[in-house]
Amino acid sequence: DTAVSQTPKYLVTQMGNDKSIKCEQNLGHDTMYWYKQDSKKFLKIMFSYNNKELIINETVPNRFSPKSPDKAHLNLHINSLELGDSAVYFCASSSHRGKAPGFRELFFGEGSRLTVL
Amino acid sequence: DQQVKQNSPSLSVQEGRISILNCDYTNSMFDYFLWYKKYPAEGPTFLISISSIKDKNEDGRFTVFLNKSAKHLSLHIVPSQPGDSAVYFCAASGNQAGTALIFGKGTTLSVSS
């Protein structure tokens, strides 16, 4: 039973289109994240939600909009896709309950590879 | 500006020998350091962590060493096995609310039999 699942796993689309990537976690965690791994292999934080509230919003174009309908889901919607959006997008979750403030053990999904043509 | 740096993109080691993966950081406010392992077409998985108040943490074949004065940590794998071949990411976090785990670029470890 997959702990953090993302759909779709692969997405090929044209420039200018709008697309969404969905993420669900069944770990009962209170915090969810979106990371982007670009061609240089950096894993960069994009957004984080804690109990459905946005707590981290890095310098990401407005075309990217996260939505958290409940604690178990964090979706990523991307408008007007550009070539530079091609990357692997990873969803992750963590629990802060009973943990030291700085400790963040993230559980990752398998990633969604987005290719913009 | 990279706060977590892994300067070696790759490392090749023979089975049975020690693998040493290095990581440097710039932010002295980091409180926790974690190592993640990633196989192709999979998400990163947590391997081992260390708090800034410790200088060593061991878990089976994996040991992480932290040198706070040098802002340097390393992951030792002894003995290395072919199944250890993967990308290893170093990551760090501070204790301020609303901060994320910051990752390095990763080091690809290849263990040959």
Image: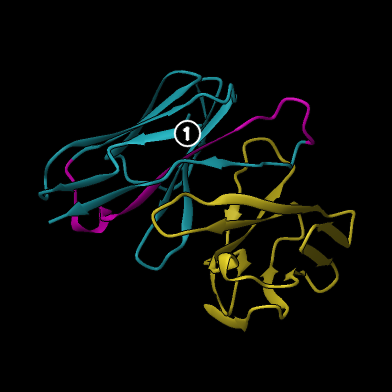
Chain colours: A cyan, B yellow
User: Dot 1: few (<14), some (14–19), or many (≥20) neighbours within 10 Å?
Assistant: many
Q: In the image shown, does B63 or A32 lie closer to the viewer? A: B63
Q: Amino acid at mark 1?
A: Val
What's drawn in magenta, residue-wise?
Answer: A80-100
Quarter of the rendering occupied by the N terminus of chain B: bottom right
Q: Is residue A99 magenta?
A: yes
Q: Residue at x 58, y 21 (%)?
A: A28
Which residue is under mark 1?
Answer: A4
Q: Residue furthest front?
A: B113
Question: Residue B62 at what x, y percent from top left?
Answer: 75, 62
- The reply to whether residue A111 is in sight is yes
Residue A85 lies in the magenta stretch: yes
Coordinates of residue A21 in the picture (x, y in percent): 30, 35
Examine the image and state in which quarter residue B8 appears: bottom right
Image quarter in which the C terminus of chain B is found: bottom right
Of all chains, the one bearing label 1 is: A
Q: How many marks?
A: 1
- Residue B75 occupies quadrant: bottom right
